[in-house]
Amino acid sequence: MGQETIDPRYLDMPHVERGMAVGLFGGSFNPPHEGHLLVAEIALRRLGLDQLWWMVTPGNPLKSRSELASLKHRLTMSEKLIHDPRIKITAFEKTLGGSYTADTLASVKARKPHVHFIWVMGADSLKTFHLWQKWQEIASTFPIAVIDRPGSTLSFLSSKMARTFDYARIDEDDAGTLWKRKAPAWTFIHGPRSALSSTAIRAVNGQKS
Protein backbone atom coordinates (compact mmCIF):
# COMPACT_ATOMS: atom_id res chain seq x y z
CA MET A 1 0.00 0.00 0.00
CA GLY A 2 1.39 3.40 -0.94
CA GLN A 3 2.02 6.27 1.42
CA GLU A 4 -1.34 7.83 2.32
CA THR A 5 -1.77 11.58 2.46
CA ILE A 6 -3.22 12.87 5.71
CA ASP A 7 -4.83 16.31 5.95
CA PRO A 8 -2.20 18.44 7.80
CA ARG A 9 -4.81 19.75 10.25
CA TYR A 10 -4.91 16.30 11.85
CA LEU A 11 -1.15 16.17 12.38
CA ASP A 12 -0.84 19.02 14.89
CA MET A 13 -2.00 18.87 18.48
CA PRO A 14 -5.37 20.66 18.73
CA HIS A 15 -5.35 24.26 19.90
CA VAL A 16 -5.91 24.52 23.62
CA GLU A 17 -5.81 27.39 26.10
CA ARG A 18 -3.77 27.49 29.28
CA GLY A 19 -5.65 26.07 32.28
CA MET A 20 -8.18 24.06 30.26
CA ALA A 21 -9.26 20.55 31.31
CA VAL A 22 -8.78 18.18 28.37
CA GLY A 23 -9.52 14.49 28.00
CA LEU A 24 -7.21 12.30 25.92
CA PHE A 25 -9.15 9.43 24.33
CA GLY A 26 -6.88 7.32 22.16
CA GLY A 27 -7.58 4.23 20.12
CA SER A 28 -7.52 2.52 16.77
CA PHE A 29 -11.17 3.43 16.12
CA ASN A 30 -11.30 0.61 13.61
CA PRO A 31 -14.03 1.54 12.92
CA PRO A 32 -15.26 4.32 15.24
CA HIS A 33 -18.80 3.71 16.50
CA GLU A 34 -21.52 4.96 18.84
CA GLY A 35 -19.95 3.07 21.77
CA HIS A 36 -16.78 5.15 21.41
CA LEU A 37 -18.86 8.32 21.12
CA LEU A 38 -20.80 7.43 24.27
CA VAL A 39 -17.53 7.08 26.21
CA ALA A 40 -16.43 10.50 24.91
CA GLU A 41 -19.74 12.16 25.80
CA ILE A 42 -19.80 10.68 29.30
CA ALA A 43 -16.22 11.83 29.85
CA LEU A 44 -17.01 15.38 28.72
CA ARG A 45 -20.02 15.60 31.01
CA ARG A 46 -18.86 13.78 34.13
CA LEU A 47 -15.28 15.07 34.14
CA GLY A 48 -16.19 18.68 33.37
CA LEU A 49 -13.88 18.83 30.36
CA ASP A 50 -13.38 21.81 28.06
CA GLN A 51 -12.22 19.53 25.23
CA LEU A 52 -11.70 15.87 24.43
CA TRP A 53 -9.00 14.84 21.97
CA TRP A 54 -10.16 11.87 19.89
CA MET A 55 -6.70 10.49 19.14
CA VAL A 56 -6.77 8.11 16.16
CA THR A 57 -3.60 6.04 16.45
CA PRO A 58 -1.53 5.09 13.39
CA GLY A 59 -1.18 1.56 14.80
CA ASN A 60 -1.72 -0.53 17.90
CA PRO A 61 1.20 -2.63 19.23
CA LEU A 62 -1.28 -5.15 20.65
CA LYS A 63 -3.08 -5.66 17.34
CA SER A 64 -2.07 -6.92 13.91
CA ARG A 65 -1.56 -4.19 11.32
CA SER A 66 -3.43 -6.34 8.80
CA GLU A 67 -6.60 -5.68 10.80
CA LEU A 68 -6.33 -1.90 10.52
CA ALA A 69 -8.15 0.22 7.98
CA SER A 70 -6.05 3.12 6.73
CA LEU A 71 -5.51 6.04 9.09
CA LYS A 72 -7.14 8.36 6.54
CA HIS A 73 -10.26 6.18 6.44
CA ARG A 74 -10.52 6.00 10.23
CA LEU A 75 -10.22 9.79 10.47
CA THR A 76 -12.94 10.22 7.83
CA MET A 77 -15.25 7.81 9.66
CA SER A 78 -14.61 9.65 12.93
CA GLU A 79 -15.56 12.97 11.30
CA LYS A 80 -18.85 11.49 10.11
CA LEU A 81 -19.66 10.22 13.60
CA ILE A 82 -18.75 13.27 15.70
CA HIS A 83 -20.64 16.56 15.74
CA ASP A 84 -19.71 18.01 19.14
CA PRO A 85 -17.18 20.83 18.56
CA ARG A 86 -15.53 20.07 21.90
CA ILE A 87 -14.34 16.71 20.52
CA LYS A 88 -11.18 17.33 18.50
CA ILE A 89 -10.25 14.58 16.03
CA THR A 90 -6.49 14.28 15.72
CA ALA A 91 -3.74 11.99 14.49
CA PHE A 92 -0.78 13.95 15.84
CA GLU A 93 0.76 10.69 17.11
CA LYS A 94 1.76 9.96 13.52
CA THR A 95 4.29 12.80 13.70
CA LEU A 96 5.88 11.58 16.94
CA GLY A 97 7.42 8.44 15.50
CA GLY A 98 6.63 6.26 18.52
CA SER A 99 3.80 3.77 18.85
CA TYR A 100 3.39 3.60 22.62
CA THR A 101 0.89 5.59 24.68
CA ALA A 102 3.49 6.35 27.36
CA ASP A 103 5.67 8.13 24.78
CA THR A 104 2.68 10.06 23.44
CA LEU A 105 1.67 11.25 26.90
CA ALA A 106 5.23 12.31 27.70
CA SER A 107 5.23 14.43 24.51
CA VAL A 108 1.86 15.97 25.34
CA LYS A 109 2.99 16.85 28.86
CA ALA A 110 6.21 18.42 27.57
CA ARG A 111 4.47 20.51 24.90
CA LYS A 112 1.39 21.54 26.89
CA PRO A 113 2.58 21.85 30.52
CA HIS A 114 -0.12 24.35 31.53
CA VAL A 115 -3.11 22.23 30.48
CA HIS A 116 -4.89 19.79 32.80
CA PHE A 117 -5.06 16.47 30.94
CA ILE A 118 -6.95 13.29 31.84
CA TRP A 119 -6.38 9.98 30.09
CA VAL A 120 -9.79 8.51 29.18
CA MET A 121 -10.39 4.86 28.38
CA GLY A 122 -13.19 2.35 28.22
CA ALA A 123 -13.36 -0.28 30.95
CA ASP A 124 -12.68 -2.98 28.35
CA SER A 125 -9.15 -1.55 28.01
CA LEU A 126 -8.60 -1.63 31.77
CA LYS A 127 -8.48 -5.43 31.73
CA THR A 128 -5.33 -5.43 29.56
CA PHE A 129 -3.85 -2.11 30.70
CA HIS A 130 -1.00 -3.88 32.52
CA LEU A 131 0.18 -5.24 29.14
CA TRP A 132 0.77 -1.73 27.81
CA GLN A 133 4.34 -0.51 27.53
CA LYS A 134 5.28 1.49 30.69
CA TRP A 135 1.73 1.21 32.04
CA GLN A 136 2.71 2.31 35.52
CA GLU A 137 4.42 5.35 34.04
CA ILE A 138 1.18 6.21 32.20
CA ALA A 139 -0.77 6.02 35.47
CA SER A 140 1.78 8.35 37.05
CA THR A 141 1.71 10.92 34.23
CA PHE A 142 -1.94 12.00 34.04
CA PRO A 143 -5.08 11.20 36.04
CA ILE A 144 -7.14 8.42 34.43
CA ALA A 145 -10.90 8.13 33.95
CA VAL A 146 -12.20 4.65 33.16
CA ILE A 147 -15.67 4.66 31.56
CA ASP A 148 -17.94 1.65 31.99
CA ARG A 149 -18.36 -0.73 29.01
CA PRO A 150 -20.59 -3.81 28.67
CA GLY A 151 -19.05 -6.89 30.26
CA SER A 152 -16.31 -4.86 31.90
CA THR A 153 -18.05 -3.36 34.94
CA LEU A 154 -16.11 -5.54 37.37
CA SER A 155 -12.75 -5.01 35.67
CA PHE A 156 -11.91 -2.17 38.04
CA LEU A 157 -11.97 -4.71 40.87
CA SER A 158 -10.03 -7.50 39.16
CA SER A 159 -7.52 -5.75 36.90
CA LYS A 160 -3.87 -5.48 37.84
CA MET A 161 -3.97 -1.73 37.34
CA ALA A 162 -6.91 -1.35 39.74
CA ARG A 163 -5.20 -3.45 42.39
CA THR A 164 -1.85 -1.71 42.00
CA PHE A 165 -3.29 1.78 42.18
CA ASP A 166 -6.22 1.08 44.49
CA TYR A 167 -4.91 3.72 46.91
CA ALA A 168 -5.20 6.36 44.18
CA ARG A 169 -8.84 5.70 43.17
CA ILE A 170 -11.33 8.47 43.89
CA ASP A 171 -15.10 8.07 44.12
CA GLU A 172 -16.91 8.71 40.85
CA ASP A 173 -19.01 11.36 42.61
CA ASP A 174 -15.78 13.38 42.70
CA ALA A 175 -14.98 12.76 39.01
CA GLY A 176 -15.43 16.46 38.26
CA THR A 177 -12.36 17.22 40.40
CA LEU A 178 -10.10 14.62 38.75
CA TRP A 179 -8.47 17.16 36.43
CA LYS A 180 -7.21 19.08 39.47
CA ARG A 181 -5.49 16.07 41.01
CA LYS A 182 -1.88 15.04 40.74
CA ALA A 183 -1.27 11.60 39.22
CA PRO A 184 -1.59 8.85 40.14
CA ALA A 185 -5.32 9.41 40.52
CA TRP A 186 -8.14 7.61 38.77
CA THR A 187 -11.84 6.91 38.88
CA PHE A 188 -14.32 4.43 37.43
CA ILE A 189 -17.45 6.02 36.00
CA HIS A 190 -20.65 4.01 35.66
CA GLY A 191 -23.31 5.11 33.22
CA PRO A 192 -25.13 4.26 29.99
CA ARG A 193 -23.34 1.53 28.06
CA SER A 194 -23.30 0.57 24.39
CA ALA A 195 -22.82 -3.06 23.38
CA LEU A 196 -21.22 -2.02 20.08
CA SER A 197 -17.62 -3.03 19.46
CA SER A 198 -15.25 -2.46 16.56
CA THR A 199 -14.51 -6.19 16.43
CA ALA A 200 -18.20 -7.05 16.00
CA ILE A 201 -18.68 -4.37 13.36
CA ARG A 202 -15.71 -5.66 11.36
CA ALA A 203 -17.12 -9.17 11.59
CA VAL A 204 -20.47 -8.03 10.23
CA ASN A 205 -18.72 -6.22 7.40
CA GLY A 206 -16.75 -9.33 6.53
CA GLN A 207 -13.39 -8.01 7.71
CA LYS A 208 -10.88 -9.81 9.88
CA SER A 209 -11.56 -9.67 13.60
Image (spheres, rainbow, N blue to C red):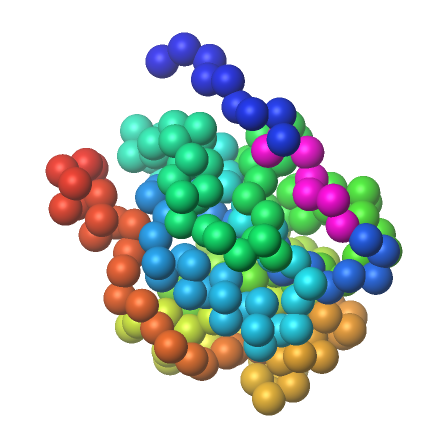
The C terminus lies in quadrant: top left
Q: Viewed as shown, does residue 79 lie left or right of 102?
A: left
Residue 205 or residue 126, whichever sits in front: 205
The residue drawn where x is 29% and y is 34% is 67
Eyeballing the image, is 118 above or below 88? below
The N terminus lies in quadrant: top left
The residue drawn where x is 76% and y is 50% is 16
Q: Position of residue 146 (x, y in %)?
A: 51, 70
Eyeballing the image, is 199 above or below 76? below
Eyeballing the image, is 121 above or below 14? below
Eyeballing the image, is 2 above or below 25? above
Q: Viewed as shown, does residue 182 lie left or right of 155?
A: right
Residue 92 visible (yes or no): yes
Q: Main secondary structure of the magenta part?
A: loop
Indicate the quadrant where residue 86 lies. Answer: bottom right
Q: Viewed as shown, does residue 19 lie left or right of 123?
A: right
Residue 192 shown in magenta: no
Q: Position of residue 55 (x, y in %)?
A: 55, 45
The residue drawn where x is 66% and y is 67% is 49
Specify the segment rendered in magenta.
10-16
Q: Residue furthest top?
A: 2
Q: Position of residue 191 (x, y in %)?
A: 42, 80
